[in-house]
Amino acid sequence: MRLAIISGSPNKKGLTADCVKSAIEGVKELKAEVTHYDLDKMKIELCQACDNGWGICRVEHKCIIEDQFNEAREKLSQADAYVIITPVYWWDMSESIKAFLDRLRRCEASKAWADKESIFLNKPVISVAAAGGSGNGVVPCLANMERFVDHVKGNKFDFISITQKSKEYKLDTIRQATVTMLKNAK
């Protein structure tokens, strides 16, 4: 069983980092494989909406931008399940998560139009919105994450909000959700 964790926070000691650690703890309980994609450590450019918004991503299902995106996407295709963890900024995902998921959506959602399988097709996805400051904005952030999962035809396993106030029990929720998802994905 292989899990891919995708996160994107510049704060390596904050709530998002704690969420990643909790998901990894769940993976370790099952002795499964995990790959963590820390998008803030990767070179991932914004989508350029090539060819009036319909670049090669629409037909060839890859991106022409030469950065770490295509390599990461290829490795992601080997995962059996996914956990996407983002801090909440302005009631939305972090900029690094948005940039990556926007490009991933263009490559993978366009496969459905061409009767090809998305790398996410029917694979379980846990989405986590971590609001470390005020705690506001988790619901619209999770709604945006849900749209991504719908577009790439993933299996919505769980949507988890976490704040500094709920951290004590929600970190365990993330660990337990990861364990349960991986057990059910076998």
Image: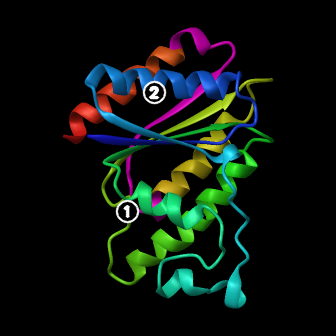
Q: Where 42 falls versus 46 (above or below)?
A: above
What amino acid type should be assigned to the residue bearing mark 2? Ala
Q: Residue at x 30, y 56 (%)?
A: 122
Q: Could you say which quadrant of the image residue 115 lies in?
A: bottom left
Q: Is residue 157 magenta?
A: yes
Q: Is residue 28 above or below residue 101?
A: above
Name which of mark 2 and mark 1 comes first in the sequence.
2
Spatial separation of the CA atoms under disc 2 and disc 1: 21 Å
Residue at numbered disc 2: 23
Q: Which residues are magenta?
A: 150-169
- Specify the quadrant that holds the C terminus: top left
Horizontal and vertical percent for residue 46?
73, 65
Other residues around mark 1 within 10 Å, as few (<14) / some (14–19) / many (≥20): many
Mark 2 secondary-structure assignment: helix
Q: Amino acid at mark 1?
A: Ile
Q: Position of residue 28 (x, y in %)?
A: 35, 23
Q: Which residue is mark 1?
A: 119
Binning the other alpha carbons within 10 Å of mark 2 as few (below 14), some (14 to 19) or many (20 upward) gives: many
Q: Dividing the picture into quarters, in which one does residue 88 lie?
A: top right
Location of residue 185 (image quadrant): top left
Secondary structure beneath disc 1? loop
Q: Is residue 34 magenta?
A: no
